Image (cartoon, rainbow, N blue to C red):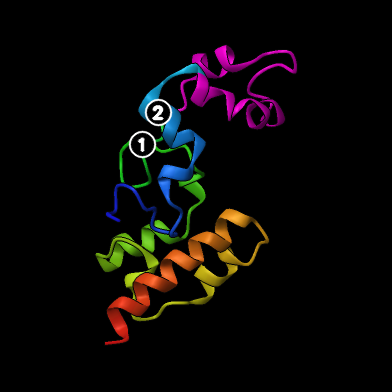
Amino acid sequence: MDKHKLAACGIDCNECGHYMLAMKHDLKSAEYLVEYFRDGGWIGKNDGAEAVLRKVPMCKGCWSDFVTCNANDCLLRPCCVEKKINNCGECGDFPCKRCTDFMTDGLEHHKKAMEHLMSIHKTIFDK
């Protein structure tokens, strides 16, 4: 995985609806985000995939210039930038408190991200 497909936090961009919609920009991809956009108040309760497409979420991964995934609130990406690493798994201090706080919030995709990071870390540091 390279940094353009794996976020600094370990989330696989290829599994993210925002990323997939930005890459494909089609109705099928937009359908996966309808409920998320409704819940966020970005489209109306009767709006569908067409409305999502009009909003054009342009996340191309956290290493691009077009990010939608709470990039302004992210504590992990700036740390990776400062340390000149692609993700937390490449860090000698992994898992730090910042990383574990993010990963232990109960979200399934964060648990999977931690697995990605642990695998990367093991590959690098358990030689």
Give the Cα distance between marks 2 and 1: 6 Å
Mark 2 surroundings within 10 Å by alpha-carbon count, few (fewer than 14), some (14 through 19), many (20 or more): some
| Amino acid type at mark 1 | Lys
Instruction: Point out the tag, 2 or 1, that comes first from the N-terminus.
Output: 2
Q: Taking 84 as reference, is 20 left or right?
A: right
Residue at image point 49% right, 67% down: 115
Q: Main secondary structure of the magenta part?
A: helix
Q: Taking 114 as reference, is 3 left or right?
A: left
Does the magenta-highlighted stretch encompass residue 50? Answer: yes
Indicate whether 80 appears above or below 38: below
| Amino acid type at mark 2 | Ala
Asked if disc 2 and disc 1 are in contact, CB closer than 8 Å, the reply is yes
Residue at image point 51% right, 70% down: 98
Magenta-colored span? 28-57
Where does the C terminus fall, quadrant-wise? bottom left
Please provide percent x and percent y for residue 66.
36, 34
Indicate whether 22 appears above or below 83: above
Q: Which residue is mark 1?
A: 60
Indicate whether 12 appears above or below 37: below
Q: Which residue is mark 2?
A: 22
Looking at the rendered structure, the secondary structure element under dot 2 is: helix
Camera-nearest residue between 113 and 58: 113
Residue at image point 56% right, 12% down: 50
Residue at image point 33% right, 48% down: 5
Q: Taking 105 as reference, is 112 left or right?
A: left
